[in-house]
């Protein structure tokens, strides 16, 4: 058990527990250990409130022990032993509200906004036991030090590579797909040198690129997750994929989709096959539990280490419905002579990340047809 008697006696720990390593089970065991003390579990978004509650119940926790807080919900249910809340729902509450909690557990601690998390922790003056959980730290010393100051010293539960080698996580095949843009686009980029935002605007509006993403996603068998950054881009891809796949269940998930609906989509995907989910990185790159998910497609580029590794983690859970996980890391080469575009540089950084994590990968170059 990753939380040892030593950690319990020390009353603090920050556990780095990668996706598929049993993080929610560890959280359940820690919470159960302290009952009848009052336990507050903080998560970064409303979808994870419902999923965490569902996970705890599946491990044997009575539903009557759990109270869920998010927008519009009652803040106090005295009979509840475990309260699960988004940080947004409680960080502005007065210190008196926090006094009843003896145990604080921060799930996906790397996503909890530092200032708000500090405010919550400072109000927990009566809280003796503090545990933070995260699948990934962002690699910066500042991020690590802030979280250690709030929860305690970092403890690595295991690594993704170790879990794969021990057959506790699905093996992963990474396919880097470099889309080679037209010579006209390359020369224009070299001349104008757009900033990162300008480059992203061009990429998400590229009809040729979007057509490639629709065809790629539609060609993949079994449950597939296509991730995007911008809602308008995601909606465009969703509409095209839904039209191209009349016989498949296709869902669109972004910040405007209510938490219970997100959880229903997650459960539907787990109970069915050949489902396509077009979702924003913000809503589905972290914490979402769909063991049968086989394919993940990066529809928008990302330069965040946490986001990339967490997104990969969505497909690593074991399931008898798949043999391996597959990641399609779609990158864009709009370079010309000595000029190298931003997102191509970020792809190089992701490859270095895969090397650090000891993931196997192959890189393919595809010439985009059309100028835009």
Image: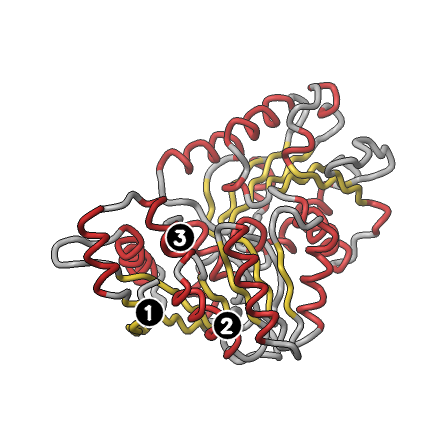
Residue at numbered disc 2:
217
Q: Position of residue 281 (x, y in %)?
A: 51, 53
Residue at numbered disc 3:
302
* Residue depicted at x 72% and y 41%: 84
Residue 370: image tag: 1
Front position in the image: 184 or 366: 184
Q: Sort mark 2 into few (<14), some (14-19) or many (20+) by Cα contacts within 10 Å.
A: many
Front position in the image: 308 or 158: 308
Question: Split into 4 quadrants, where in the image is the N terminus?
Answer: bottom right
- In the image, taking residue 280 as reference, residue 183 lies left or right, namely left
Q: Position of residue 128 (x, y in %)?
A: 64, 29
Question: Split into 4 quadrants, where in the image is the C terminus?
Answer: bottom left
- How far apart are labels 2 and 3 at the CA level? 18 Å
- How far apart are labels 3 and 1 at the CA level? 24 Å
Q: Is residue 369 above or below residue 36?
A: below
Front position in the image: 302 or 19: 302
- How far apart are labels 1 and 2 at the CA level? 20 Å
Q: Sort mark 3 into few (<14), some (14-19) or many (20+) by Cα contacts within 10 Å.
A: some
């Amino acid at each position: 058990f990753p939380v040892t008697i030593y950690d319990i006696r020390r009353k603090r720990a920050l556990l780095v527990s990668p996706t598929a390593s049993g993080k929610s089970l560890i959280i359940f065991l820690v919470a159960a250990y302290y009952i009848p003390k009052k336990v507050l579990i903080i998560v970064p978004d409303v979808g994870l409130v419902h999923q965490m509650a569902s996970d705890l119940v599946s491990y044997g926790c009575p539903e009557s022990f759990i109270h869920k807080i998010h927008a519009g919900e009652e803040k106090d249910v005295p009979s509840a032993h475990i309260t699960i809340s988004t940080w947004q729902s409680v960080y502005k509450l007065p210190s008196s509200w926090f006094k009843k909690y003896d145990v604080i557990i921060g799930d996906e601690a790397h996503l909890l906004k530092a200032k708000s998390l500090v405010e919550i922790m400072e109000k927990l003056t009566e809280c003796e036991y503090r545990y933070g959980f995260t699948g990934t730290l962002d690699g910066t010393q500042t991020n690590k030090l802030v979280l250690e100051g709030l929860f305690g010293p970092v403890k690595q539960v295991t690594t993704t590579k170790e879990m794969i080698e021990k057959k506790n996580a699905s093996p992963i095949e990474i396919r880097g797909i470099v889309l080679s843009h037209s010579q006209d686009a390359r020369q224009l980029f070299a001349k104008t040198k757009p900033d990162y935002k300008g480059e992203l605007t061009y990429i998400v509006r590229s009809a040729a690129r979007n057509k490639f993403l629709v065809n790629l996603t539609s060609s993949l068998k079994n449950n597939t997750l296509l991730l995007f950054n911008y809602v308008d881009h995601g909606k465009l891809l969703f509409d095209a994929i839904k039209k191209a796949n009349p016989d498949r269940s296709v869902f669109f998930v972004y910040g405007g989709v209510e938490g219970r609906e997100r959880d229903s989509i997650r459960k539907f995907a787990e109970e069915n096959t050949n489902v396509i989910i077009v979702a924003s990185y913000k809503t589905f790159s972290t914490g979402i539990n769909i063991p049968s998910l086989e394919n993940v497609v990066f529809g928008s580029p990302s330069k965040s280490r946490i986001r990339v590794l967490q997104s990969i983690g969505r497909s690593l859970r074991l399931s008898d419905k798949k043999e391996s996980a597959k990641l399609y890391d779609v990158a864009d080469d709009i370079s010309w002579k000595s000029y190298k575009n931003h997102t191509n540089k970020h792809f190089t950084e992701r490859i270095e990340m895969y090397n650090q994590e000891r993931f196997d990968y192959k890189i393919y170059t595809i010439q985009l047809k059309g100028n835009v």
